[in-house]
Structures are given as C-alpha cells and as structure tokens.
C-alpha cells in the first residue's frame, strides 16, 4: 500500500508549458500564481480561531452518531414517522453490491465510517465535514470530525488499540455551548470529553503545473478513488500514514488530525486545474507546518506562498461554503438550505434519529425547499458599508433591481371591513400595498466575497438567461450591487428539478 501511494503521489502531475493559476471557486485570483511556468504551488496559512473537543471511549461513535447529521455507523438507530428511511427493518446494515467495512465500533481507534461512495461505504482516518443541529432542526454549527491521532505508527500504536478517539473542530466562541450540549446528552454513555487547547490549525492547497481544464484532475484517481476501497482499519491506517508521512515526514507524529476537503469534489471532477484544499491540526510546538512540507515527494519544484486566514475564508466563500459558526447566526438556518445534502457524507438520508432530524427528514422527503445558499460578489463595497454590515444584528435583505419601464403596479390588498364603522386609524376600504419578498439575505462576507441565501424562484433568471436580473442591498444610505455566482452544485440541482 505504501509503495502504491508513493507512486500515486509521484503521478500527481502532467507535463506541459501552461501557466499555473489558482481558482478559488470559479474566480481567478490574479495575485496567486507561480512565477515559473513549470512550478507547482503550495499556498498555506495558520487559522487562529479554531478550538477542539476531544471525545473518547467505547461509546464515542454511538454518542456522536446521535448528535450529528452524518451517518457514522452502518446501522439505523431506530425508525419513526419522520425518519427518511422507508425500510421496516430496525438496526438494518447498509446494503449494496460492494463490500461492507469491517470494524468494532467500541474497540480500537479504527477511524471514521463514511456511508456513501461509488464503491460503497468505507473507513478513513481523514476528517469528515458534518453539522450539529438544535431540536428544531436549525444549524448550531458545522464541524470537522477528525479521527485522532492522524498517523498510526510505533509511537501511537498503544493508544490506537484502546478505543475510538476523535477531535471535533469548532470556532472558539461556541465551545462552551457544545460542552454543555455534550454533558446533557452524555447520560450513561461510556465516554470522556474535554477541550484540547494546545493545538494549531493550518489550511493549505496544492495546485499542479501543466494541467488544462479538460484534463482529468489527478487528485480524483490518486486520492479520492483509492480512499473508497478502504474497508478495514488496517488499510485505512496504512493509507493515512503513507499519505501524511509522504507530505510531512518531519512532523507526522505531531499531526493530530488531517482533513481532505471533499466539498469541492464536483469541481475537481470537471476541472483538471482545480486545486485541492486540506486542513491539518498539529500540536502547538509546530512553528510552521510548511517548513516541514516534503516537496521532494513530487517530480517538480514548488513555490510556497503564505496567506492569512482571511484569504482562505474568501476562497471558501467563493465556493459558497461555510467555515464555522462565526459566519452565521446560530439556530437560524436549515442544513439543506446550506447545501449540506450536496456534500459527501455530510447529511445522511437514512441514518435514523439524531438531534434535529425531524425537520431535515421532512424537508428531504417532501422536496419543499424555498431557499439555498449561493456565492455572491459585491461590486461597490465601501469601508463604511463594511462597518455597517459587520454591525448588523440580522441578515440584510438582498433585493432585485426592477427596470422602471417594465415595472408592474404593486398589488393592493383590501383590509377587512370594520364592524364599528369609521375608525380613526383609517377607512374600512383602505388599500394596503403588499410588501415584496426579498430575493435573498446576506449570510456572511469577507472583502468583496460573500454567501447569501437566495430564493430558488430566482435561479432560472440568474443562471439560465442571457440578461440576468441585477440585485442590490441597502445599508445606511448606500446601495451595494450584488452579483450572484454559479455554485458548484447548480447543474446537479437543476437536473433534479
């Protein structure tokens, strides 16, 4: 396995003289490109606002499975009227034509169960993107769940054999709420949890030279596909160890968790030039993880660029992604509105009961969803407008620009007749103008990039017409132009309508 993976890493390239340019989402970032046409590019930076809860013990995975939207076990917890799964068998295991993973959920640090792929369920030691909901089905926070430690070797082997252990990633401000939630749900579960403070978080992405948009993206065949064939803990441990030690041999024993960004999988399947994003969690004594990056694992030279956390946040916004509870008002949004159903193994449609499952299940089964999150760009955002937007205590409305020549009269709504005759507050025949619904609401932004919850009824006019409507939001006395961008999942969503 290790030799195979090493060959895979060496194969992550193609030869040509095309310039290396980086796209975050679909937008070209002109300031990020390699100076040499034959060089690959590593862009990295430390992410300062992340904290971690460690959860361990024999009942850990069952405990987490009842709290998150991802399916972490191959059995259905139970069935009720609002459970999406229609099978009548309780505790039924995943069934498909592919081999099912082998593991004991209560013994051994075996990694994390991934319920869906083209090759069926599999085990992995890389983190999984998931979410915590409140009892009403609204998002409390997203999270990355990391099997920990990231690498299995002689130094960690004794620890590996005990029981499952995970690091859960959150923004720092929501840690107290999550600790309270864990305590209230612990009951008789044999688990321990605590905040881990001596950590550092790093984001990075890698882009290869010599690729065109029509080329196969090398990350798909060399990483994504091999991952889905890992059906036992030994294979997943060996794959993770080989991958991580190939990239970071000097600090592999200090990597507590490793996440391969899978939300961009659709983009990578359709664009050979798309970069692959990663996140790693290390011990705090790692001064700069990328001084230890092993560029010799690749057959070309790397240029390294260090960026701040704002840069990486803007990249995620251009994809239309959240990254932590700081980007939202907790308890206000549904996971399907945030497109979590288009991310691999983020929301399960057949896991059974978990906190907030009822509304998610009902929305999924009825197909009634009126809004979805999309990436946007601002055209004329002033410093004063940024200040006012950051001070907003609610999501600002985004409205559609109406051409006065084509504007239809606003409909009037009659008030109900008063049984008491004339009223000092108006005649019984008073006509009220109906308030127009906003086209969307701004959820989060950084610089000129943002994400907004748009009404689905506007999608056809935005994405499938030669002259799409124009949108704006008003803050203070300023009118800010808003340009919706096409999300990664749009074609898949359109084909399902």
Image (spheres, rainbow, N blue to C red):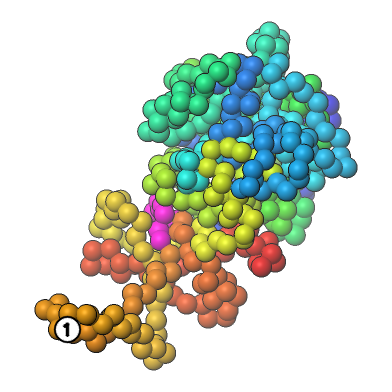
Secondary element at image label 1:
loop
Residue 480, visible in the rendered structure: yes
Callout 1 crowding tier (Cα within 10 Å): few <14, some 14–19, many ≥20:
few
Q: Position of residue 268 (x, y in %)?
A: 69, 51
Which quarter of the rendered picture does the C terminus lie within? bottom right
Q: Nearer the viewer, residue 442 or 193?
A: 193
Residue 278, visible in the rendered structure: no
Q: Nearer the viewer, residue 224 or 66?
A: 66
Say above or below: 393 vs 59: below
- Residue at position x 70%, y 46% from top? 85
Q: Place residue 436 in its image quadrant.
A: bottom left
Majority secondary structure of the magenta segment? strand
- Residue at position x 76%, y 27% from top? 236
Magenta stretch contains residue 105 = no
- Residue at position x 40%, y 61% from top? 441
Looking at the rendering, the stretch of residues picked out in magenta corresponds to: 441-450
Q: Position of residue 385 (x, y in %)?
A: 28, 59
- Residue at position x 46%, y 67% from top? 483
Q: Nearer the viewer, residue 466 or 94?
A: 94
Say above or below: 466 vs 171: below
Q: Position of residue 120 (x, y in %)?
A: 80, 41
Q: Give the residue number, with chain letter if any, for mark 1.
A: 421
Q: Place residue 439 in its image quadrant.
A: bottom left
Farthest residue to the right: give it: 97
Q: Position of residue 95 (x, y in %)?
A: 82, 40
Say above or below: 49 vs 339: above
446 on left or right of 474: right
How many numbered marks appear? 1
190 on left or right of 420: right
């Amino acid at each position: 396995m290790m030799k195979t993976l090493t060959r895979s890493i060496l194969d992550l390239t193609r030869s040509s003289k095309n310039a290396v340019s980086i796209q975050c989402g679909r937008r070209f970032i002109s300031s990020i490109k390699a100076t040499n046409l034959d060089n690959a590019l590593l862009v990295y930076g430390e992410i300062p606002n992340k904290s971690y809860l460690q959860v361990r013990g024999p009942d850990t995975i069952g405990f987490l499975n009842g709290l998150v939207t991802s399916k972490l076990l191959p059995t259905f917890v139970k069935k009720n009227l609002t459970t999406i799964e229609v099978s009548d068998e309780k505790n039924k295991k995943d069934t498909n034509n592919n081999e099912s993973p082998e593991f004991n959920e209560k013994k051994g640090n075996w990694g994390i169960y991934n319920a869906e792929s083209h090759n069926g369920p599999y085990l992995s030691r890389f983190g999984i993107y998931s979410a915590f909901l409140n009892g009403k089905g609204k998002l409390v926070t997203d999270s990355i769940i990391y099997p920990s430690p990231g690498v299995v070797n002689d130094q960690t082997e004794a620890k590996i054999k005990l029981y499952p252990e995970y690091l859960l990633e959150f923004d720092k401000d929501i840690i107290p709420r999550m600790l309270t939630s864990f305590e209230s749900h612990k009951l008789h579960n044999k688990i321990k949890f605590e905040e881990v403070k001596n950590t550092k978080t790093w984001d990075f992405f890698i882009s290869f030279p010599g690729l065109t948009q029509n080329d196969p993206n090398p990350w798909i065949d060399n990483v994504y596909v091999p991952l889905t064939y890992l059906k036992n803990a030994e294979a997943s441990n060996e794959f993770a160890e080989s991958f991580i030690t190939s990239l970071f041999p000097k600090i592999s024993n200090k990597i507590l968790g490793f996440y391969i960004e899978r939300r961009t999988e659709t983009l990578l399947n359709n664009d050979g030039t798309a970069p692959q994003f990663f996140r790693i969690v290390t011990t705090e004594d790692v001064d700069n993880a990328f001084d230890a990056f092993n560029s010799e694992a690749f057959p070309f030279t790397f240029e390294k660029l260090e960026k701040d956390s704002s840069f990486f946040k803007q990249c995620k916004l251009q994809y239309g992604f959240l990254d932590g509870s700081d980007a939202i008002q907790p308890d206000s949004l549904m996971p399907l509105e945030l497109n979590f159903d288009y991310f691999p193994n983020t929301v399960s449609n057949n896991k059974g009961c978990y906190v907030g499952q009822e509304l998610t299940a009902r929305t999924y089964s009825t197909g009634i969803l009126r809004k979805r999150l999309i990436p946007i760009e601002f055209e004329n955002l002033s410093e004063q407008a940024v200040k006012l937007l950051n001070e907003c205590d609610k999501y600002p409305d985004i409205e559609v620009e109406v051409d006065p020549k084509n504007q239809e009269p606003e409909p009037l709504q009659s008030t109900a007749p008063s049984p008491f005759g004339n009223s000092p507050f108006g005649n019984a025949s008073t006509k009220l103008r109906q308030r127009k619904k906003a086209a969307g609401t701004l959820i989060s932004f950084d610089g000129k990039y943002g994400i907004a919850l748009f009404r689905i009824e506007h999608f056809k006019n935005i994405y499938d017409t030669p002259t799409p409507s124009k949108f704006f939001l008003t803050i203070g006395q300023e009118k800010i132009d808003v340009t919706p961008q096409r999300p990664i999942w749009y074609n898949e969503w359109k084909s399902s309508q």
